Image: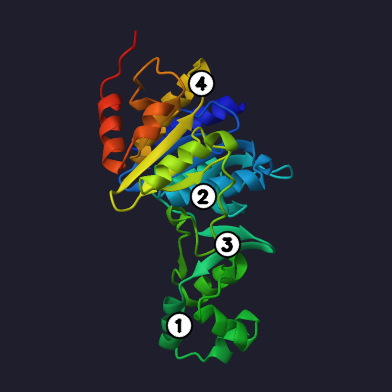
Amino acid sequence: MSRSALVENVTAMLGDAGFLVSDRCAIRPKSFDVAARRGEDVLLVKILGNIDAFDAMTGAEMRRLGTYLNATPMVVGLRTRDEELKPGVVYFRHGVPVLSPDTAMDLFVEEVPPLIYAAPGGLYVNIDSEVLADAREDRDWSLGRLAKELGVSRRTVSKYEDGMDASVDVAAELEELFDAPLTSPVSVLDGAEEVRDEEETPEDPEVAPEDESLVTVFTRIGFEVHPTDRAPFKTVSENEHERQQVLTGRSEFTKTAEKRARIMSSVGEVTRTRSIYVVDELKRESVDGTAIIEQSEMEAIDDADDLRDLIMERGEDPEEVA
């Protein structure tokens, strides 16, 4: 299957599952292909045939964007260089959960979350420690008795009851012993944080020299600015006091800039953020809801309210400027 066909299939699946899906980010470099929202669940999805193409820089960017936009970064892919991705299993690349299309279909359409995740050494499941302890005590089994049945140490059984995950084989043996489900799903929509390696959000990249004036304005009017290096926008800026988030682009107004502005508008609709594109010379006032603002206008903004009013004025009244 070609990558374009795979992207179309995954996008259609998300639509069938009730997600609002953004336009495809058909520009390079790009950290994600589409954004999607269903209720309060927001996804940033990268779609790949071979997930080994997902590099550390892209993973770091997706995790940063997930933090800033309150979204779950996710990869949907078919295979590694060595094997097909198994259905019902969550994999990880650079701290980002990875699903096969079948696993994604089960999760989002059938609403059946995966129970298994891949980690160094094999496949594992989350053991519900309280259910396991209750089941053992109901049988009046000691830790030593259960350890003997499993062929492991008493210390290992104690760790299972303290929350340590188990291999698929051990979990299956436990469920057979107690004739009861003892596993809990992997919380993919929370980033699968309970099973992935604990990693802090990667630091922001350096601000590009041509964008320093833009960052200066946002900082002056009370925003925290997060530069990007692989997104269709230059920065994500947030003002917690005003509860504003703004996606920002910056360049001459070219066909490529217009394309970026359209993508920003679409992504902004999904992530519930405003978007602006700063240009040297104003030729249009907006592109699909992304406000177009001249650099001189931007530098004249005094506070967050002025910015909000300008975005509202431009973004709601698209118009060619003579």
Q: Earlier in the sequence, mark 2 or mark 1?
A: 2
- 280 vs 284, nearest the viewer: 280
Q: In 3D space, how far apart are the residues under numbered discs 2 and 3 (Cα atoms)?
A: 12 Å
Residue at far right of view = 82
Q: Position of residue 29 (x, y in %)?
A: 60, 32
Q: From the image, tell me which residue sits under label 2.
A: 64
Q: From the image, tell me which residue sits under label 3.
A: 199
Q: Position of residue 78 (x, y in %)?
A: 61, 39
Q: Earlier in the sequence, mark 4 or mark 1?
A: 1
User: For the residues carrying marks 3 and 4, which lies nearer the camera in this image?
Assistant: 4
Q: From the image, tell me which residue sits under label 1.
A: 133
Q: Residue at x 59, y 49 (%)?
A: 60
In the figure, is residue 214 to the left or right of 207? left
In the figure, is residue 308 to the left or right of 124? left
User: For the residues carrying marks 2 and 3, which lies nearer the camera in this image?
Assistant: 2
Q: From the image, tell me which residue sits under label 4.
A: 252
Which quadrant, please, contains the N terminus?
A: top right
Contact between marks 1 and 3 (CB within 8 A): the answer is no
- 153 vs 225, nearest the viewer: 225
Q: Amino acid at mark 4?
A: Glu
Q: Amino acid at mark 3?
A: Glu
Instruction: State whether residue 137 is above or below residue 45.
Output: below
Q: Quadrant of residue 236?
A: top left
